[in-house]
Image (cartoon, rainbow, N blue to C red):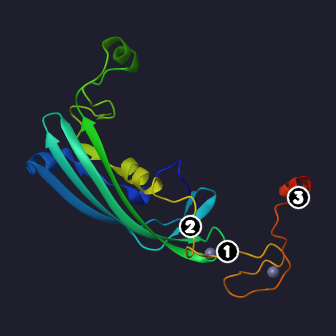
Amino acid sequence: MKNIESIPGELRCCILLSDIHKSGEQYKTAAELALSEAVDYWGQSYVPEEPVRVNITANYARSDIAVRVELSCGFRVPCSRCLEETRLAINGDMRYLFTMRRLPRAEEERAGGEEDGYIDAIEMEKFQAELDLSPYIWETLILNLPERVLCREECKGLCPICGCSKNARECGCMTDETDPRLGALKNFLW
Ligand SMILES: [Zn+2]
Ligand SMILES: [Zn+2]
């Protein structure tokens, strides 16, 4: 399983800055990147079902490059209530700003007051030849993985007594619907 701390090598995607420059105002590229391992996140395993389809759009202006990362892919993951394997479609859309300008450090910002709106920009070297977008593709993917996935909105989950899926059948187990923590309170009120 793939931990989110390390970017999978399969997601490697670099664009040449010369290609962006050559393209004039807008540069577009697309890629299909197949993950070879499940992604381990939120304490569960997201098994890739298809390659991650990535569309990159880059707009270049003076010393800044605005990059949009759009992606879609499909995973299989257990339903949070009944554990049945469920298909999950992911769509991500994130924007990043790369700049060759030197950004003020935190202490300079405090001294100099508010910045010109590029606080979240990612600094890059003036003479670097390519832009490695792998970490940003990975981030766009991870940030769109939901913590809870349901096989259907009205999933009834598992019976706490016999463990069967209540979606399939009514097992007839006697379950006390009262929360035990409320039992004492009920006696007190009545
Ligand atoms: Zn379910
Ligand atoms: Zn049961």
- Residue 21 location in percent, x, y? 12, 45
Disc 1 within 8 angstroms of ligand 1 (CB): yes
Q: Can residue 55 be seen in this view?
A: yes
Quadrant of the displayed image that contains ligand 1: bottom right
Looking at the rendered structure, the kind of residue marked 3 is Gly
Which quarter of the figure has residue 69? Answer: bottom left
- The quarter in which the C terminus is drawn is bottom right
- Residue 58 location in percent, x, y? 20, 49
Q: Residue at x 88, y 58 (%)?
A: 183
Which residue is denoted by mark 3 in the rendering?
183
Looking at the rendered structure, the kind of residue marked 1 is Cys
- Residue 42 location in percent, x, y? 60, 56
Q: Residues within 10 Å of mark 3 (few under 14, many from 20)?
A: few
Residue 128 placement, left or right of 76: left
> Compared with residue 168, is residue 141 higher up or lower down, i.e. above or below?
above
Q: Residue at x 73, y 75 (%)?
A: 158
Marks 1 and 2 sit apart, C-alpha to C-alpha, by 10 Å
Q: Which residue is drawn at 86% across and 79% down?
A: 174
Which residue is denoted by mark 2 in the rendering?
149
Looking at the rendered structure, the kind of residue marked 2 is Val
2 vs 3, front mark: 3
Numbered mark located on residue 131 in the image: none
Q: Which residue is drawn at 10% across and 52% down?
A: 23
Which residue is denoted by mark 1 in the rendering?
82
User: Nearer the N terminus, badge 1 or badge 2?
Assistant: 1
Element under disc 3: helix
Element under disc 1: loop
Which quarter of the figure has residue 179? Answer: bottom right
